[in-house]
Image (spheres, helix red, strand yellow):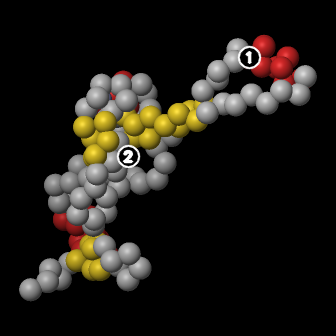
Amino acid sequence: MQNSYLIRHKNCGFFDYTQEYKEAREIIGMPLKRASRGRTKGGKGSTGVVQCTNCGQTVPKDKAKKVTSKLNLVEHTLAKELRAQGAYIASPTVLKHYCISCAIHFKILKIRSADNRRKRGKLR
Ligand SMILES: [Zn+2]
């Protein structure tokens, strides 16, 4: 027997909760600290793991906080001079994965109030 509160997406084939179930859960106030359970997994069963860049902890891929930044190989003033002479200076992008405690430590995330925890969307 299939669970009646689950619905299967036509496009991707993943299971998700029905809209009625989500609304009912809001009213009843089921013991979920966050609407997304702290992850972006949705109805998907499992995801791979990544290691935290800072502490090396194994984190689920959809839970880890991704941060992309540009790496400056040449000093700013020198780069300006070189660029004026027509040189191309490569600045490779670096992808970092952080576990939640490291993300809070580096102020990528902030601890939110109970009402704000329910809000989805960009955090910063
Ligand atoms: Zn960490």
Camera-side residue of 25 and 89? 89
- Is residue 7 toward the left or the right of residue 121 in the image? left
Residue 43 in percent (x, y) is at: 27, 67
Camera-side residue of 44 and 48? 48
Residue 35 in percent (x, y) is at: 30, 56
Specify the quarter for ligand 1.
top left
Q: Furthest-bottom residue in view?
A: 1
- Identify the residue at image location x=41%, y=79%: 11
Residue 53 in percent (x, y) is at: 37, 29
Residue 36 in percent (x, y) is at: 31, 56
Measured in 3D between alpha carbons, the distance from the residue under mark 1 to the one under mark 2, in whole angstroms, is 39 Å
- Which amino acid type is marked by label 2? Asn
- Which amino acid type is marked by label 1? His
Task: Give the secondary structure at mark 2.
Answer: helix
What crowding class fits label 1: few (fewer than 14 Cα within 10 Å), some (14-19), or many (20 or more)? few
- Is residue 121 toward the left or the right of residue 19 in the image? right
What crowding class fits label 2: few (fewer than 14 Cα within 10 Å), some (14-19), or many (20 or more)? few
- Identify the residue at image location x=89%, y=28%: 86
- Identify the residue at image location x=25%, y=37%: 58
- Identify the residue at image location x=64%, y=23%: 72
Q: Would the CB of label 1 be found within 8 Å of ligand 1? A: no
Name the residue beneath numbered marker 1: 76
Q: Furthest-left residue in view?
A: 1
The disc, 1 or 2, on the residue closer to the chain's N-terminal end is: 1
Residue 12 seen from this side: yes
- Residue 118: mark: none
Task: Give the secondary structure at mark 1.
Answer: helix
- Is residue 27 toward the left or the right of residue 85 in the image? left
**Is the residue under label 2 in contact with that under label 1 (CB below 8 Å)?**
no
- Residue 116: mark: 2
